Image (cartoon, coloured by chain):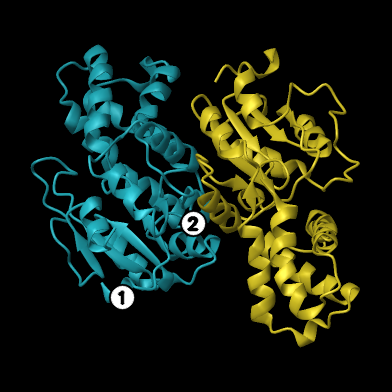
Chain colours: A yellow, B cyan
Amino acid sequence: MRAVADVEALVFDVFGTVVDWRGRVACESAAFLARHAPDVDPAAFADAWRRRYSPAMEEVRSGRRPFTRLDVLHLENLATILPEFGIDPVAIPPSELEALNLAWRRLDPWPDAAPGLTRLKRRFVIAPLSNGNIRLMLDLAKRAGLPWDAILGAEIAQAYKPSPEAYLRNAEALMLKPERVCLVAAHNGDLAAARRCGFRTAFIRRPMEHGPGQTTDLRPEQDWDAVASDLEDLAGQFGL
Amino acid sequence: MRAVADVEALVFDVFGTVVDWRGRVACESAAFLARHAPDVDPAAFADAWRRRYSPAMEEVRSGRRPFTRLDVLHLENLATILPEFGIDPVAIPPSELEALNLAWRRLDPWPDAAPGLTRLKRRFVIAPLSNGNIRLMLDLAKRAGLPWDAILGAEIAQAYKPSPEAYLRNAEALMLKPERVCLVAAHNGDLAAARRCGFRTAFIRRPMEHGPGQTTDLRPEQDWDAVASDLEDLAGQFGL
């Protein structure tokens, strides 16, 4: 933990690290699917929706598309996957798709998230550094009781992780050198990109993010500055 | 209060409306002045520092200067006023000026601020819409226990109030139409600019912001949508 002794701010990946996206998206999709495609497995639908996440952001990261909020990308991605499940997107009223899209603002936190963040907040500035937009993160935090000091992230940077600008512009907003900021994430790729920008790194094990068959990010793939089983464990490692 | 029935978010002016800038800046300046200009009245020094506030931002608003964080403007303004009080800026170590400049991150809330915001947060999204930068607002909120849902403001908009962009880009970050957002402020000019952008408006009486001799903003100068004596009174008017 020596490398994190000078850290002033902890910034967090959110989808998967702080909240369980898959459970809620599947749950809210189930009601939608019951009306339009009753044979579809809601978890498979959630996974398909999420698979479009990175390719959609890649359009922005590559410069082919100006920065576009994740709420918008999520809605486009939803329309894109409907045919894969035998649903005609044109047959669904836009308001129904917009309502389902808001499931992403109602994700449930992992049980350790709110109490862990409350402890970590005693010593550190805490903020999300998510690809989710400000309003999405705000609604999610308000519902789940996540006590962020500020809502940082892709919208502040106008750049999506893992682009370096997504990390560096958020450190700049905190008026901190990158080595005074630690990214907390359940994803090795996110941590690797942050480390390349000079951030400190903390890996959180979330072996159920993708459900019982998860094969990725089951363990730390580099010597991250901290490794914890959850956010309460991380707080404990800091003596909080 | 009918005009505010559809409001989803309350955004707040901070310096003067939520916190007492003059008391703390005078108090921290007193220790500085004791070393360098013992005959100077700390409140007069605080007032002189604050008088540079709007002209410094006007350089940005006019387009003569790119957007520059308020922490930076405050530090420049401090160096600018020193000769007025017989202090040679070159004789003071930069680190001492930087330390004094941080007084703006340690402003005390008016006594009603934290309890009033806590009540208002039950129904509304609450966020600062201040000219203060993210880090300044964050530190201030953390110290004072202000339970913001997010830190909005000039840095998000890359524009200073009362420029229209400062209001409109923050409503856009909330993904709300301007009429779903209400500015809460102790300054008629700020409210007038927000109203021109379509915001709802709430005036808070802060007759001591500028000390006992205050002559400005003692009363509402338009028919603002709400008028309250403080943030607890405002919460009460909303039935919270």
State which quadrant residue B33 falls in. top left
Position in image of residue A87 (x %, y %): 84, 80
In the rendered image, which quarter contains the C terminus of chain A? top right
State which quadrant residue A13 falls in. top right
Position in image of residue A238 (x %, y %): 60, 19
Q: Helix, strand, or loop for circle 2?
A: loop
Image depth: mark 2 or mark 1 in front:
1
Q: Amino acid at mark 2?
A: Gly
Task: Please rate how many residues cluster around mark 1, counting C-alpha atoms within 10 Å: few if below 14, some from 14 to 19, many from 20.
Answer: some
State which quadrant residue A103 falls in. bottom right
Read off the residue under disc 1: B3
B60 to B197, vertically: above or below:
above
Q: Give the residue drawn at x 78%, y 34%.
A: A191
Which chain does tag 1 point to? B
Q: Say the numbered circle drawn on residue B63.
A: 2
Q: Give the residue drawn at x 43%, y 54%.
A: B160
Query: Taking B201 as reference, is A102 left or right?
Result: right
Q: Amino acid at mark 1?
A: Ala
The one nearer the camera, B217 or A117, is: A117
Which chain does tag 2 point to? B
Q: Is residue A198 visible?
A: no
